[in-house]
Image (spheres, rainbow, N blue to C red):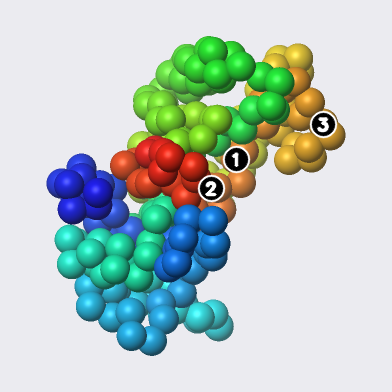
Amino acid sequence: YYDSVADRILRHLKDRPLSIVRAPDNIGETFFQRHPLKGMSRGIVEIPQPGDDSYMALDGALGLRTAAQFGAIELHGWMSRLDRIDNPDRMVFDLDPDEAVSFAEVKKAARDIAQHLDAIGLKSWPMISGGKGVHVVVPLDRSLAFDDTEIFADGFARGLAEQAPQHFVANMSKAKRRGKIFVDWLRNKKTATAILPWSLRARKGATVA
């Protein structure tokens, strides 16, 4: 699968730190990997971080094949790229609905959020996540640092929840999101990740983002 979509996914992977969900034996037994492992070197770019374990990125098609060879199913990317690692080139709002919320409602919410963003000069595009939600992705020009975009994302999500409390919640509490959509802005913190376009999901049927 990853060979067949390499030309589509590599533009999103290029120079981007990432984490992977691996299923070496079967899709029912997975684990989340943030750091490179010994033996996992061909096409893997190691990213040293002060006071922390190294992170990793994939070096083009070779890195993608290595990840697949090690049983990588899901590819989750940072909001920034290696050449300006502290300046995100995108922002993501993950719309995570309660079980009672229909997908039609989630799609409408994504359109509404896109209109709100457009009204303040931010273009965006929607992406089905391979699950029950939708991601609203906002490309950025990298003029701001993570501290700036995190503050904005937090305020924007809370503003949605205050403006339309019957539809949105900005708190990750399961109890508070009953019948509503959680606008997950937390993926905009440094080292946080979001599923990348064309990534498989480690779910029944191997759905695709």
Front residue of 47/144: it is 47
Upstream in sequence: badge 2 or badge 3: 3
Front residue of 207/118: it is 207
What residue is pinned by disc 2? 188
Please identify the quarter of the rendering in which residue 132 is found.
top right
Q: What residue is rendered at 69% in x and 27% in y?
A: 99
Question: What's the residue type where badge 2 is placed?
Answer: Asn
Q: What residue is rendered at 38% in x and 39% in y?
A: 208
Can residue 59 be seen by looking at this rendering? no
- Crowdedness near tag 3: few (<14), some (14–19) or many (≥20) residues, C-alpha within 10 Å: some
Question: What's the residue type where badge 3 is placed?
Answer: Lys
From the viewer's perspective, is residue 21 above or below residue 187?
Answer: below
From the viewer's perspective, is residue 99 above or below residue 115?
Answer: below
Residue 129 left/right relative to 176: left
- For the residues labelled 1 and 3, the Cα–Cα distance comes to 16 Å
- Crowdedness near tag 2: few (<14), some (14–19) or many (≥20) residues, C-alpha within 10 Å: many
Please identify the quarter of the rendering in which residue 15 is found.
bottom left
Residue 133 position in % (x across, y down): 54, 30
Check disc 1 and report its element: helix, strand or loop. loop
Residue 42 position in % (x across, y down): 23, 78
Q: What residue is rendered at 62% in x and 38% in y?
A: 184
The label number, if any, that marks residue 185 in the structure image:
1
What residue is pinned by disc 3? 176
Check disc 2 and report its element: helix, strand or loop. helix
Upstream in sequence: badge 1 or badge 3: 3
Residue 149 position in % (x across, y down): 52, 44
Residue 34 left/right relative to 64: right
Check disc 3 and report its element: helix, strand or loop. helix
Name the quadrant of the C terminus: top left
Question: What's the residue type where badge 1 is placed?
Answer: Trp
